[in-house]
Image (tube, rainbow, N blue to C red):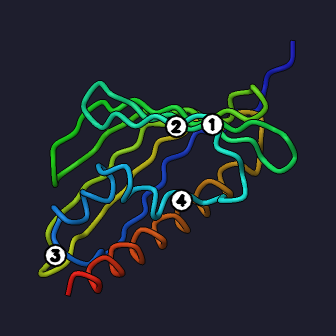
Amino acid sequence: MTSEFIEHTTFVIERELPGSPRHAFRFWSDRALKELWNACHPEWAVLEEAFDFRTGGGEVKRWRTLDGEELAYHAYFLDIVPEQRIIYAYEMTFAGRRMSASLATVEFSPLGTQTQMKFTEQAAFLGDKGARRRRVGGTEEGFDRLASAIAEASDAAA
């Protein structure tokens, strides 16, 4: 019997975001605002999308890559406290095979006129020794897009 490679890890990413926690929280809870920063592969075909932002709700995205493979993200919202935190569990699959399963917590705290966002993910990466590096890097890039999207929205409102 051979065992599949599995890597357990926890990583934390923090960002200072423009505006109040209420404003920052909207970029997670509003589907259109989340799309501004969370859509990272515009060249992929979207096959399925669902967004039900409430405790007990979920989020689903399925794409077809340029190589014709299918990537899927399924999340379940476990706890939501507006303007303070979001806790969700999610899995990702590629070509019908589970790549990872995670528990993620997003915390929002006031920091003067800004918001301190702290993202903590506990993940199990399956079968791919490079997955952790790519996921952490991709999450960092996504949060850079989030900070930019919030800054642009703040500039437009001013």
Q: Which element carries disc 3, helix, strand or loop?
A: strand
Residue hosting label 1:
62
Camera-side mark, 3 or 1: 1
- Name the quadrant of the C terminus: bottom left
Disc 4 marks a residue whose amino acid type is Thr
Instruction: Mark 4: give few (<14), some (14-19) or many (20+) Cα within 10 Å.
Output: some
Which residue corresponds to mark 2? 49
Mark drawn on residue 139 = 4
Mark 4 or mark 1, which has the lower sequence index?
Answer: 1
Front residue of 129 and 71? 71
Labels 2 & 1 near each other (Cβ < 8 A): yes
Q: Rounded to the nearest whole Å, what is the CA distance between mark 2 and mark 3?
A: 34 Å
Residue type at numbered disc 1? Arg
Q: In terms of image quadrants, where is residue 24? A: bottom left
x and y percent of residue 48 in the render? 58, 34
Please tell me which of labels 2 and 3 falls first in the chain. Answer: 2
Which residue corresponds to the image point at 33% horizontal and 53% vertical from the top-left?
A: 28
Q: Which amino acid does label 2 sit on?
A: Glu
Which residue lies at the image location 50% right of the left edge and 34% below the top edge? 60
- What amino acid does circle 3 point to? Leu
Quarter of the image with the N terminus in it: top right
Q: Do the residues labelled 2 and 3 touch (CB within 8 Å)?
A: no
Is the residue marked by circle 3 packed among few (<14), some (14-19), or many (20+) residues within 10 Å?
some
Q: Is mark 1 on a helix, strand or loop?
A: strand
